[in-house]
Amino acid sequence: MTSTLRNILVVVLAVTGFSAQAQTTTTSGSPYSTFGVGNIKGSVLPHNRAMGGLSAGVRRPGGFFSINPANPASYSSIQLTTFDIGAYGSFNNLAKGDVSETGFNANLSHIAFGIPVSPKSALSFGLIPFSEIGYSFKSPAIIGTDTVNYVYNGEGGISKAYLGYGVQLGKNVSVGVNASYLFGKLSRFSSLRLAPTTPGVSTKVENSTHVGGLSFDYGIQYVANLSSKTRFTLGYSGTAQSKLNSTDNSFITRFTVDEEGNEGIALDTVYRREGQKAKTVLPLMHTAGFTFERTNKWMFGADVSLGQWSDYREGDKNPQLQNTFGVAVGGQITPDVTAVNNYFKLIDYRLGFKYDKTYVNLQNQDIKQIAITAGLGFPLPSSRSTFYKINVGAEFGQRGTLENNLVREKFANIYLAFTLNDKWFQKYKFD
């Protein structure tokens, strides 16, 4: 079996294995994903997430080639066929007043390819998450003499299938662009649920939106060699404003509640509206940053990001989202890529910090998110021109606050990814 066929088989088996186990399991989620298109995931892969989410000035951190969809200008640094696939798990704790609960969510996170076209250009394509909705909470109330619960649930999200190209122009400048198709379903449910001991029927409102449409990312990087082994990279990436086609469906149904409080089957549908066409407008977004790097030794940098989410629209509705602002700082160090007898010196050690002012504002309180990130890159035994690495990353942070009777969400996100570098699509004289 040739090297190319063998590695294609590895990829197929990896994808099959992940797909078979990538069912989302959610016991609780983020109440802040109620708003807009949910919690924005970003286009950074686990090795970047472990460095605080750096992307604008990142090209080739360490001795491996990697994929950085957040800035397509970085594709020009890919000189070996690169494959990356990963999954994540998220633990969170929600608190409001003296009440708290925990939850867990897991899923396949991404699959991406990078393929060199020439010594100074490359293609990349893949599937990555754009946003995620997942929440479930209730609010008790008394109507007359009856105790009821207002129950709210949401699920779904938007995925991003992209195709990009990056090329180096001259000695120092690289540019790139991604053409993406964003698609997904956003479902939100609200119900007035009677207590099991209360006679009568409960009512549920279901609103779902199917979205799909094109989006474009673009980027530029300037690389200055400060010495034979040290370089400075300045980068910028942006996402153009896009209008996604959306189809809205709404239903109001009535149902009963059993003695254990479980929802029974729908008795009837009192309202139905299907196929309502509209446009979902996603805003212009910017990220700028830099990195300093010593080849195969260390790298550190910082990013600043802005999103004009006040321009976000759902058809003719203005959800009154606010503009976002974020800062990311991080880096990595590899003690000695040539070490033979000490594996720990071959590992990439990553650390970072990020701050985000999200597009949610409740009771005149900005909902902010902060996190400390860390990660490791474990190289695996390689052969000839084939290299393997396992990347592990983690984010430990908090979203929201207990002030003004709001919800504080503490989370731990764990990421696991497999990276392969190889010379595909090349004929060898001996195999």
Image (cartoon, rainbow, N blue to C red):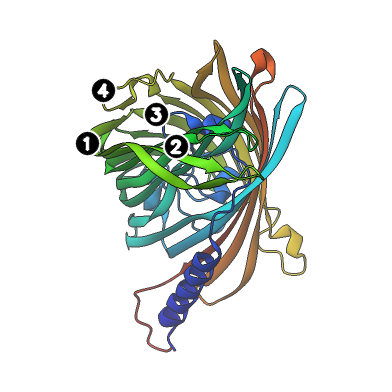
Indicate the quadrant where residue 345 lies: bottom right
Q: Which residue is mark 2?
A: 188
Q: Amino acid at mark 2?
A: Arg
User: Of helix, strand and loop, which one carries label 2?
Assistant: strand
The residue identified by callout 3 is 286
Residue shown at 61%/22% (left/top)? 141
Q: Is residue 423 above or below residue 161?
A: below
Q: Which mark is residue 258?
A: none
- Label 1 SS: strand
Left or right: where 352 falls relative to 357? right
Mark whose residue sits in front, 1 or 3: 1
Residue 259 image position (x, y, % from top left): 65, 44
Query: Observer-nearest residue: 413 or 329?
Result: 413
User: Mark 1 or mark 4, which is nearer the start of the sequence?
Assistant: 1
Q: CA distance from mark 3 to mark 4?
A: 25 Å
> Which residue is labeled 1 in the image?
277
Q: CA–CA distance between discs 2 and 4?
A: 19 Å
* Residue 224 is at least partly visible in this image: no
Compare marks 2 and 3 and give the one earlier in the sequence.
Answer: 2
